[in-house]
Amino acid sequence: MASTRGYFITGTDTGVGKTIVTLGLMQWLQDRGHRVAGMKPVASGCAATPQGLRNEDAQQLQQQATIELAYEAVNPYAFAPPIAPHLAAAAAGCRIDLETIHTGVLQLAEQADRVCVEGIGGWLVPLNERDAVAELAGRLGLDIILVVGIRLGCLNHALLTLRAIEASGLRLSGWVANCLPPRSGHADVGINYLKTKTYAPLLGVVPVLSDVSAMAVAACLSPGVPDNS
Ligand SMILES: Nc1ncnc2c1ncn2[C@@H]1O[C@H](COP(=O)(O)OP(=O)(O)OP(=O)(O)O)[C@@H](O)[C@H]1O
Ligand SMILES: [Mg+2]
C-alpha cells in the first residue's frame, strides 16, 4: 500500500499557530489542485453540544477540508476539560490509542490525496502512559512541519524541538515561523538566528495578521513547500 501523503504539523508549544498553519497549508495544497482532509486526532477543551463534544480547531479543519467529513473522522478523541490529553483521557475513563488514530488517517487518505494532521501541544506532550506526540508522529509516518511561534522564549523551544525531532530520526520537511501578537521588532533577528541553526528549510514566515484566515496564511507559505507528489 502506498504511504499516506500529507503532513503532521507540530509546534514549539500550545497556542503557537498550529491550527492556522494547518489551515493555511490545506489551502496551499487545495490551490494546487489537491483534495485535502484535515485531522485533529486529540482535542481537550471541547464544548458540549447536542451533537456531542466539539472542538473549535477540529471544526475549522472539518470546514476547510475539500471533502465532507464526519466530525468524528476529524477528531476521534474529544475531551471536555482543557487539560493535558492523557489526563483528560483518564478522567473520561479512556485511553488514547495510536493505532486507532492511524486507522483514522488511513481512512481519510482513501478519500483525499493529502491529509494534514494537527499535533497536540508540543512534541513531547504525553498521550497515554507510554506514548507522546513524537510516537504518534512516528506511527503516522507523515512528513513533519514544525510551527515555531515567534515570541519571547521561542529560540530555546525551537532548538529543543528541532533536536528532539532530529533524534527521533523522523523526516522534517521544514519549519514555519509564525509571528505571534503583539508585534515585535525582534522577530526577524530570531528567525535569522534559527535559520543558521537548522538545515530544515524555512517554509514560510507568517507575520502578525490583523485578519487571520487560511488564505492569508497560504499566501505566506513559500513555493518551496513540498507538495509530496
Ligand atoms: N500570525 C498570527 N497573527 C495573528 N494572530 C495569530 C497568529 N498566529 C496565531 N494567532 C492567533 O493565536 C491563537 C493561537 O493560534 P492557534 O490556535 O493556531 O494555535 P495552536 O498551536 O493551534 O494552539 P493549540 O495548541 O491550542 O491547538 C489564535 O487565536 C490565532 O488566531
Ligand atoms: Mg490548534
Image (tube, rainbow, N blue to C red):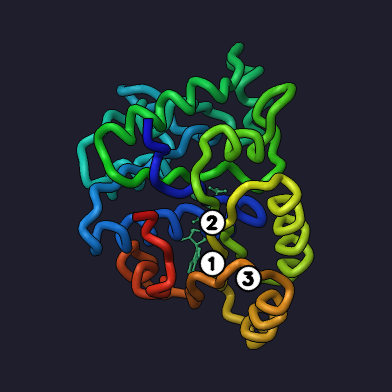
- Left or right of residue 145: residue 54: left
Alpha-carbon span between mark 2 and mark 1 = 7 Å
Viewer-nearest of labels 2 and 3? Answer: 2
Question: From what the image shows, is residue 73 above or below residue 60?
Answer: above
Do labels 2 and 1 touch, CB within 8 Å? Answer: yes
Q: How many marks?
A: 3
Q: Residue at x 69, y 74 (%)?
A: 194
> Of residues 209 and 41, which is closer to you in this image?
41
- The crowd level at tag 1 (other Cα within 10 Å; few <14, some 14-19, many 20+) is many
- The crowd level at tag 2 (other Cα within 10 Å; few <14, some 14-19, many 20+) is many
Look at mark 3 in the image and give the residue it sits on.
150
Amino acid carrying label 3: it is Ile
Give the percent coordinates (x, y) of residue 24: 37, 61
Give the percent coordinates (x, y) of residue 59: 35, 41
Look at mark 2 in the image and give the residue it sits on.
145
Question: From what the image shows, is residue 53 above or below residue 92?
Answer: below
Give the percent coordinates (x, y) of residue 134: 66, 40
Do labels 1 and 3 touch, CB within 8 Å? Answer: no
Classify mark 2: helix, strand or loop: strand
Look at mark 1 in the image and give the residue it sits on.
176
Q: Residue extending furthest front?
A: 1
Classify mark 3: helix, strand or loop: strand
Amino acid carrying label 2: it is Ile
